[in-house]
Image (tube, rainbow, N blue to C red):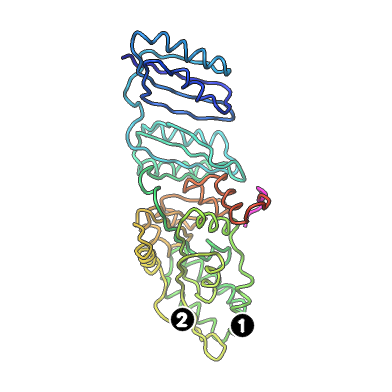
C-alpha cells in the first residue's frame, strides 16, 4: 500500500465531498485521515489515503477527474508522512476585538510562534459587534501562553482568552457571576445611599474595597451603617432602577438553553439580587440580607457576610449540589472580593475588572458586553441567535444584530 495525500481546493457547494468520495468506489483505497474547512465559500479538503501501489495512478486520475467536474483543483503528494504533524498540548486561544486590527492579530500570532506554538486552525466565532476568532494551537505550554498573551492583550488593546482544549469543555457547566458592576451596571449600595444622602461617601469606600485596599466585610458594615433610617420602600425604587449590563439577558438565556447551570453570588443584598435572579432564570443565588425593622433599614445586615471567602465557598457548594466538578465551573467578576472564586473555578474571567482581579484571572474581557463571555466559552454568534429564536418561539422574527439585552 502507498500513502497519498490529496489537497482539494475551490468553490464549495453541497455534495462536493460526496462526489469526490464516490469516485473512490471500486478502488483499492482506504481513508486514513480527512480534514475539511470552508472559508468564505472556498473549500479546502485534505484526504489521506492508503492505496494499493498498482492502483495509485488510477485512483489519482479518478479523484482529479471528479474534482474537475465540480470546479475544484487537486494537489497530490505521493510521499506524505503518516505521522500527525500537529504537536502535543492543544490549547484554544480566543481573540476578540472591536475592531480587530491586523497589527494586533499579528502580535498574538507572533507570541504564539515565539513560544514554539503552531496554529493548527483559525475559526471565526462571531463577526459583530465584536470580531471573535478562535485559534487552535499545539506545541506551546498553556501557562506560558496565557502569560504572554495577557501581556500582548494589554499592548494590542484586544481581549485574548487561553484555555485547554480538553475535557473541561464537555458536559454540563456551572457559571457563577458577581452581580454589581458585572451582571448589572450599578453598585446597589450606592443607589441606596442616594436615599440616605451619603452617596459620595459610600462610593469612595466601595471603590477602595473593590481595589482590595480595604477589608470587604469591614467596609460593608461601615457602608450599611450609613443607610440606617432609609425606608424599606427605597428597595423597590432601587429594584426598578437597576440597569442590566448589555448582553446580560442574552448570556443567561443562551446558557440556560444550552444546558448550563447559572448562579450569582453577591456582596450586595438579597432584597435586590433574589428577585433579579428569579427574573433571569438563574438557578442559585446568594447575597447579604439587610435588616429591616418597622419599615426602616437598621444599618445592619443579618447572617454571615458574603465576602470573598463566602463567594468561593458558594461556588464550591453550588457545584456540589449540581454534581458538576470544579474543573467545569466558570466564575465571572470585577473586583478584589471575586479573587477567591475566580481562582477556584476551572475558568476565571475578569470582566472590566480591577487590576488585582485581572492578575488572578485566567482571562479578561474588557468590552462592555456581558454576552462576549459566550465566545470565550466557544459559543458562536449563530448559536446565540438560534437560542434567541428558540426562546421566542417558532415564527418569531430574528433579533436585530445590533440589539443587546
Is residue 254 positioned above or below 104 on the image? below
Image quadrant holding the C terminus, namely bottom right
Who's the residue at 57% across and 72% down the image?
Answer: 190
Which residue lies under the disc numbered 2?
301
Which residue lies under the disc numbered 1?
233
Is 318 in front, or is 243?
318
Magenta region, mostly helix, strand or loop?
loop
Who's the residue at 55% across and 46% down the image?
Answer: 383
Is residue 46 positioned above or below 146 on the image? above
Numbered disc in front, either 1 or 2: 1
Who's the residue at 61% across and 52% down the image?
Answer: 389
Q: Position of residue 388 (x, y in %)?
A: 60, 53
Is 213 in front, or is 386?
386
Is residue 189 positioned above or below 33 on the image? below
Is residue 277 positioned above or below 232 on the image? above
The magenta span reads 399-405
Query: Callout 2: helix, strand or loop?
Result: strand
Q: Is residue 404 magenta?
A: yes
Who's the residue at 51% across and 51% down the image?
Answer: 373
Q: Is residue 117 left or right of residue 15?
A: left
Q: Position of residue 341 (x, y in %)?
A: 39, 61
Q: Position of residue 355 (x, y in %)?
A: 46, 56
Q: Is residue 293 left or right of residue 172?
A: right
Amino acid at each position: 500500500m502507498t500513502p497519498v495525500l490529496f489537497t482539494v481546493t475551490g468553490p464549495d457547494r453541497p455534495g462536493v465531498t460526496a462526489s469526490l468520495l464516490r469516485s473512490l468506489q471500486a478502488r483499492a483505497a482506504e481513508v486514513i485521515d480527512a480534514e475539511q474547512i470552508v472559508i468564505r465559500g472556498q473549500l479546502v479538503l485534505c484526504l489521506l489515503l492508503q492505496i494499493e501501489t498498482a492502483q495509485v495512478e488510477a485512483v489519482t486520475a479518478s479523484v482529479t477527474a471528479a474534482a474537475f467536474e465540480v470546479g475544484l483543483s487537486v494537489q497530490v503528494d505521493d510521499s506524505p508522512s503518516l505521522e500527525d504533524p500537529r504537536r502535543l498540548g492543544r490549547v484554544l486561544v480566543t481573540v476578540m476585538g472591536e475592531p480587530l486590527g491586523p497589527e494586533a492579530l499579528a502580535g498574538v500570532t507572533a507570541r504564539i510562534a515565539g513560544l514554539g506554538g503552531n496554529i493548527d486552525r483559525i475559526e471565526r466565532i462571531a463577526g459583530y459587534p465584536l470580531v471573535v476568532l478562535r485559534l487552535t494551537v499545539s506545541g506551546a505550554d498553556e501557562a506560558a501562553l496565557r502569560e504572554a498573551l495577557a501581556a500582548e492583550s494589554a499592548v494590542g488593546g484586544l481581549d485574548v482568552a487561553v484555555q485547554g482544549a480538553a475535557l473541561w469543555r464537555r458536559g454540563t457547566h456551572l457559571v457563577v457571576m458577581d452581580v454589581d458592576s458585572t451582571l448589572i451596571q450599578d453598585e446597589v449600595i450606592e443607589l441606596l445611599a442616594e436615599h440616605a444622602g451619603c452617596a459620595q461617601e459610600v462610593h469612595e469606600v466601595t471603590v477602595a474595597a473593590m481595589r482590595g485596599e480595604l477589608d470587604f466585610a469591614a467596609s460593608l458594615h461601615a457602608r450599611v451603617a450609613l443607610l440606617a433610617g432609609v425606608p424599606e420602600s427605597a428597595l423597590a425604587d432601587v429594584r426598578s432602577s437597576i440597569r442590566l449590563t448589555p448582553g446580560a439577558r442574552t448570556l443567561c438565556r443562551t446558557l440556560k438553553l444550552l444546558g448550563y447551570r447559572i448562579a450569582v453570588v453577591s456582596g450586595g443584598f438579597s432584597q435586590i439580587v433574589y428577585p433579579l435572579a428569579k427574573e433571569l432564570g438563574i438557578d442559585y443565588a446568594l447575597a447579604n440580607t439587610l435588616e429591616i425593622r418597622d419599615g426602616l433599614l437598621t444599618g445592619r445586615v443579618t447572617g454571615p457576610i458574603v465576602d470573598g471567602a463566602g463567594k468561593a465557598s458558594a461556588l464550591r457548594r453550588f457545584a456540589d449540589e449540581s454534581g458538576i466538578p470544579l474543573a467545569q465551573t466558570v466564575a465571572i467578576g470585577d473586583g478584589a472580593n471575586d479573587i477567591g472564586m475566580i481562582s477556584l473555578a476551572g475558568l476565571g474571567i475578569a470582566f472590566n475588572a480591577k487590576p488585582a482581579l485581572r492578575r488572578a484571572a485566567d482571562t479578561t474581557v474588557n468590552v462592555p458586553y456581558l454576552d462576549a463571555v459566550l465566545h470565550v466559552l466557544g459559543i458562536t454568534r449563530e448559536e446565540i441567535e438560534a437560542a434567541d429564536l428558540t426562546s421566542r418561539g417558532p415564527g418569531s422574527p430574528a433579533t436585530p444584530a445590533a440589539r443587546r439585552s
